[in-house]
């Protein structure tokens, strides 16, 4: 079974996030990158509906956050 346009767009966006060095960037730089990338995604995948594009952006923004260190509990 072929992936849906949503799945293809999601996978492409994640690949771009990893390749473009967006992870851990300054929030304003990330916003600019996501603004431009979502326009690209909408052009490339016109079959996506607005809620799907919004969901993709949310997933991408979460994915681009730097990893959080877990604090160890001192007992």
Image (tube, grey):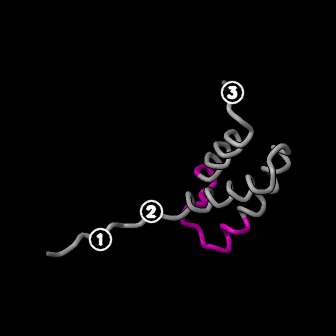
> Which residue is drawn at the image coordinates 85% and 48% (left, top)?
43
**Real-space CA distance between mark 3 and mark 1, rounded to the nearest whole angstrom:** 42 Å
CA–CA distance between discs 2 and 3? 32 Å
Looking at the image, which residue sits at the far left? 75
x and y percentages locating residue 32 in the rendered image: 73, 67
Estimate how packed mark 3 is, as few (under 14), some (14 to 19) or many (20 or more) residues with alpha carbons within 10 Å: few
- Classified by dominant secondary structure, the portion drawn in magenta counts as helix
Q: Earlier in the sequence, mark 3 or mark 1?
A: 3
First to last magenta residue range: 18-32
Rendering quarter of residue 24:
bottom right
| Image mark count | 3
- Depicted 73 relative to depicted 3: above or below: below
The residue carrying mark 2 is 67
Quadrant containing the C terminus in the rendered view: bottom left
Report the front residue among 14 and 49: 49
Circle 2 residues within 10 Å: few <14, some 14–19, many ≥20: few
Residue annotated with mark 3 = 2
Q: Nearer the viewer, mark 3 or mark 1?
A: 3
Q: What residue is disc 1 on?
A: 71
Residue at the image point whose x is 67% and y is 70% from the top: 29
- Residue furthest out toward the top: 1
């Amino acid at each position: 079974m072929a992936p849906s346009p949503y799945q293809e767009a999601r996978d492409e966006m994640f690949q771009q996030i990893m390749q473009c060095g967006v992870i851990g960037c300054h929030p304003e730089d990330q916003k600019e990158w996501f603004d431009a990338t979502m326009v690209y995604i909408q052009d490339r995948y016109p079959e996506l509906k607005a809620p799907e594009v919004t969901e993709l952006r949310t997933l991408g923004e979460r994915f681009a956050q730097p990893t959080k260190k877990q604090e160890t509990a001192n007992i």
